Structure formats: C-alpha cells, structure tokens
Amino acid sequence: MRRLALLAIALAVAPLVTVGAQEGLVVTHSSFGPVRFGMTTAQAGRALGLQVTYEGAEVPEDTSCGYARWDGLPRRVRVMVTNDTIVRVFVQDSTARTADGMGLGSTEQQLREPYADRLMVSPHEYDDGHYFTVTPVAPADSAYRLIFETNGRTVTSYRAGLLPAVGWIEGCL
C-alpha cells in the first residue's frame, strides 16, 4: 500500500533533461538516458525531471510488476517496474538508439559488428526472427543484458535491463 501511495505522488520537478524525440533516447545494457536500472521510480523521476505515472490496468494491485510512464518519454518506450524498482526498458521507437547506434531497422549483420564477441543468437519464440542477446564486458555489469528482437532481417524491438526481468519474453505476467 505504501509503495502504491509513493508511486501515485506526482514529482513536481522542473525538467532537468529533455528525453523526447528531438534528441532521441540513448539505451545501454544498464540505463536509458539518465536512468539506471535498479533505481526506484522516484529516483528515476528526479533523474529525468519528469512526472511519473503508471499505464492504467497494466499495474497489478500488489504493484509487484507494472509499467511506468514519464511525460516526455517516447510513447513506444515502456519502462518495467517490479516492487518500485526500474528493471527494464522495452523499445519500439525509432528515435531511441543504443550507445552503439543500434535500434529499430538495424540489420542482423549490423548487430554482429559491435557485439560479435559477446553475442548469443537464438530463435524467436513466435516468428521466424531471432533474439540477439548482448552480454556486457565488465564483470560488474554481469546482471544486465541488451536483447534485440528481429524478424529475420532487421530489429523490430529491443529491451535492456536487469536479469531476470530483461529476459521475460511476455513482460509482466
């Protein structure tokens, strides 16, 4: 109940950074923009300088898993929260790119170039595409992953975040 009350509080903070389509959103295995996976929703709201809300019916009553929104974040970027902790971001927006420049429309061959020695490719669960799972180099980042989904040719979506949540194909169950 306390978590739900905290999540409902509007963070009336002037924007500190712009996280819109103009500049694009940079995603890494451990962060998106100024938000690091593992932050609380309040910490993330302050880092973004934006008001936090939840996506309607997607938040279960016990708040164990749901999706947060911040005004100014691209619409097709979904932020997964478990127990008030930011655990992953799911991207279907062409303005959001990884630090290596990968994103929607990148080809499977382009994914192989920057990630070759730390890439695992596996068949997609639902279509003829693939999952390209990138493991970070630094041992301190071993709890994070970057996972691209393709249609067999190009990236159709991707997600980044903490294990195990970043690997959940269905999102919040």
Image (cartoon, grey):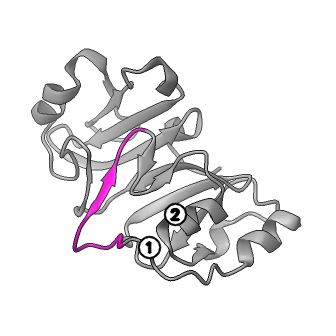
> In terms of depth relative to the viewer, which is nearer, 44 or 127?
44
Q: Amino acid at mark 2?
A: Ala
Q: Is residue 73 above or below residue 131?
A: below
Residue at image position (82%, 60%) is 62
Q: Position of residue 101 (x, y in %)?
A: 18, 46
Specify whether residue 99 is painted magenta.
no
Secondary element at tag 1: loop
Taking 110 as reference, is 171 left or right? Answer: right
Instruction: State yes or no: discs 1 and 2 in contact (Cβ < 8 Å).
Output: yes
Q: Main secondary structure of the magenta part?
A: loop
Specify whether residue 26 is painted magenta.
yes
Q: Is residue 94 above or below residue 165?
A: below
> In terms of depth relative to the viewer, which is nearer, 83 or 58?
83
Secondary element at tag 2: helix
Residue at image position (25%, 64%) is 24
Tell me the tag on residue 79: none
Residue at image position (34%, 28%) is 134
Residue 108 quadrant: top left
> In terms of depth relative to the viewer, which is nearer, 84 or 93?
84
Q: How many marks?
A: 2
Q: Amino acid at mark 1?
A: Leu
Residue extent of the magenta highlight? 18-29
Q: Residue under label 2, please give it.
A: 47
Instruction: Assess disc 2: are there few (<14), some (14-19) or many (≥20) residues with their C-alpha within 10 Å of its C-alpha.
Output: some
Mark 1 vs mark 2, CA separation in Å: 7 Å
Taking 62 as reference, is 124 left or right? Answer: left
Residue at image position (49%, 41%) is 161
Q: Position of residue 18 (x, y in %)?
A: 35, 73
Q: Position of residue 126 (x, y in %)?
A: 38, 41
Q: Residue under label 1, please give it.
A: 16
Taking 72 as reference, is 111 left or right? Answer: left
